Amino acid sequence: MNTGTPRSTWQRDELLHLLALSGTLAGLSITGVTLLRTLGKAFVVQTIADDVLALSALLFLLCTHAIFFALRTRRSALARTLENVADALFLFALTGMVVAGFIMVYSVW
């Protein structure tokens, strides 16, 4: 990434925000898994929900790694590829959290 252009500055800011958000959501997913495990109810629906949350946490952590390497590389083509990978991982992980949320709401009702 060129460090002087407004577009690269905007991309860097966006990646930094996504990095912080991915780390936070990974922690939230792990907290959700922990809470589901400590409830002691072994409903099939809840084990599916905590598996989906665990997968989401893993995807968020992979996203943070992709973002970190995208910020550190000096090759613009690799940075763009890593940025696209990070965006896809973030989208899949966020979708997994939403699905797990619906599963948890369904299991409570």
Image (tube, grey):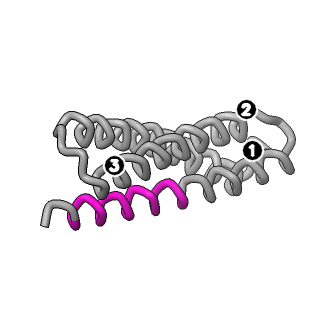
Q: Residues within 10 Å of mark 2 (few under 14, many from 20)?
A: few
- Residue under label 1: 4
The residues tagged by marks 2 and 1 sit, at their Cα atoms, a distance apart of 15 Å
| Range covered by the magenta-colored residues | 91-106
Left or right: residue 44 versus residue 10 is: left
Say if the magenta span includes residue 36.
Answer: no
Q: Amino acid at mark 1?
A: Gly
Residue drawn where x is 47% and y is 49% of the image: 56
On the image, the x and y values in percent for residue 100 come to 35, 58
Picture residue at 26% right of the left edge, 37% below the top: 37
Residue beneath the point at 54% across and 54% down: 90
Callout 1: SS = loop
Seen in the image, is 31 located left or right of residue 7?
A: left
Q: Circle 2 — which element?
A: helix
**According to the image, label 2 marks what residue?**
72
| x then y, percent, for residue 33 | 33, 40
Of labels 2 and 1, the one closer to you: 2
Question: How far apart in space, not on screen, are marks 1 and 3 (Cα)?
Answer: 49 Å
Residue type of the residue flagged with mark 2: Arg
- 50 or 28: nearer the eye? 50
Residue 7 place in picture, x, y as percent: 69, 57
